[in-house]
Image (cartoon, grey):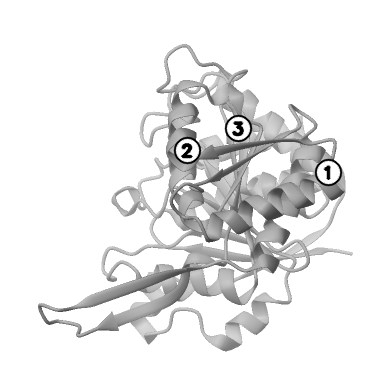
């Protein structure tokens, strides 16, 4: 049975990197014998400018028919920030219940790391971010808006169900990785005493009852970012809430060498998941064939793993490591020594070999 994959190339350089990821997907399919079918959607800034639509409700019904979605980028210079992000990305995450944001932080050989003396042996961890609750749930409002007495309230919503399913996913991933078998809860129990009291209690209750083989650790978010810079080798899997996860994963991207290599997944283990490079649409590079497609190819690799094509996913990652480690001069746009298209060709050829 063929994997049904939705493709949203999106804005800016999104279509350029998506083409290269699909090229590598085809190479993996040819080598490992799995079948897939893709359907492309035009959601993004150009469609919004043309029709005023972001992500129509009927489109969500269409997307529910796929096992996975590959997203290029969302963000248009002629559209006010927040419209596309809320109207497409957040709407899809919430409506499709993609309650896990999964962000590997892995330094590949020959990728420049801003941390002195750190090597690929030191930087290989994963952040599991709760993706549908917290401060991003949209709860709150204004009182006396536009007056000197204006009040703005933004509430962090944390449900026991949402916290538990995120924690279980993180425990299971820690067991599957079978690396240090250590799960770190990142929070702020000394200040956010209600929300993170629940997180911490659930963390230990689930660990005691279901995952006694997994070591548990806790760190305040400020200590977590400090140690991500000073001692990234301490981490195996980090689990945290929506806001803290958003912040620490961008630091993680820098630690692993920048936006050109960082990819992420919005995961619904029981439904449709969406995978994307995290670097954004980079409109200043649009149409120049100089943007680095490695992050989008990495997103495709994550997608294959989630689809159950573990052997193919491993081959794609091996090909990425080979190309990055032996071919590219830099991970930065315009400095790779190859064009966007040529980098995609190199990875596809490495997969096929």
Q: CA distance from mark 3 to mark 2?
A: 23 Å
Nearest the viewer among 219 and 238 is: 219
Q: Is residue 209 left or right of residue 43?
A: right
Secondary structure of the residue carrying numbered label 1: loop
Label whose residue precedes the other's in the sequence (1 or 2): 1
Above or below 226: residue 259: below
Disc 2 target residue? 253
Residue at the spot x=43%, y=47% of the render? 247
Residue at the spot x=27%, y=63% of the render? 77
Nearest the viewer among 147 and 274 is: 147
Disc 3 target residue? 346
> Dot 1, crowdedness within 10 Å: few (<14), some or many (≥20)?
some
Q: Is residue 188 left or right of residue 308?
A: left
* Marker disc for residue 264: none
Quadrant including the N terminus? bottom right
Marks 3/2 in contact by CB < 8 Å: the verdict is no
Identify the image quadrant of residue 349. top right
Disc 1 target residue? 211
Q: CA distance from mark 1 to mark 2?
A: 29 Å
Residue at the spot x=42%, y=42% of the render? 291
Marks 1/2 in contact by CB < 8 Å: the verdict is no
Secondary structure of the residue carrying numbered label 3: helix
Q: Residue 9 location, x and y as percent?
A: 51, 62
Label whose residue precedes the other's in the sequence (1 or 3): 1
Is label 1 or label 3 in front? 1
Nearest the viewer among 331 and 189 is: 189
Residue extending farthest to the left is: 148
Q: Residue 321 location, x and y as percent?
A: 63, 27
Nearest the viewer among 83 and 8 is: 83
* Circle count: 3
């Amino acid at each position: 049975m063929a994997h049904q994959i939705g493709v949203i190339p999106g804005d800016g350089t999104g279509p350029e990197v998506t083409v290269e990821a699909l090229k590598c997907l085809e190479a993996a399919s040819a080598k490992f014998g799995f079948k897939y079918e893709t359907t492309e959607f035009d959601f993004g800034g150009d469609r919004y400018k043309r029709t005023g639509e972001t992500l129509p409700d009927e489109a969500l019904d269409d997307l529910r028919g796929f096992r996975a979605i590959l997203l290029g980028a969302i963000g248009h210079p002629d559209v006010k920030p927040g419209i596309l992000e809320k109207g497409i990305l957040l709407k899809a995450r919430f409506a499709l219940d993609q309650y896990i944001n999964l962000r590997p932080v892995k330094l590949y050989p020959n990728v420049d790391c801003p941390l002195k003396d750190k090597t690929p042996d030191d930087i290989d961890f994963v952040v599991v971010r709760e993706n549908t609750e917290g401060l991003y749930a949209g709860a709150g409002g204004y009182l006396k808006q536009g007056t000197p007495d204006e009040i703005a309230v933004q509430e962090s919503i944390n449900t026991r169900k949402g916290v538990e399913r995120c924690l279980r996913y993180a425990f299971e991933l820690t067991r599957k990785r079978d690396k240090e078998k250590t799960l770190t809860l990142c929070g702020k129990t000394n200040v956010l005493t209600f929300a993170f009291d629940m997180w911490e209690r659930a963390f230990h209750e689930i660990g005691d009852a279901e995952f006694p083989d997994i070591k548990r650790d806790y760190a305040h978010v400020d200590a977590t970012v400090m140690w991500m810079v000073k001692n990234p080798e301490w981490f195996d899997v980090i689990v945290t809430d929506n806001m803290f996860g958003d912040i620490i994963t961008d630091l993680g991207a820098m630690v692993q060498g920048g936006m050109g290599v960082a990819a992420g997944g919005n995961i619904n283990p029981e439904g449709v998941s969406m995978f994307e490079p995290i670097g954004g649409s980079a409109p200043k590079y649009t149409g120049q064939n100089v943007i680095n497609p490695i992050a989008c190819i990495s997103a495709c690799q994550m997608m294959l793993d989630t689809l159950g094509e573990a052997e193919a996913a491993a081959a794609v990652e091996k090909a990425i490591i080979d190309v990055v480690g032996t071919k590219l001069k830099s991970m930065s746009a315009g400095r790779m020594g190859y064009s966007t298209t040529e980098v995609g060709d190199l990875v596809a050829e490495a997969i096929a070999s």
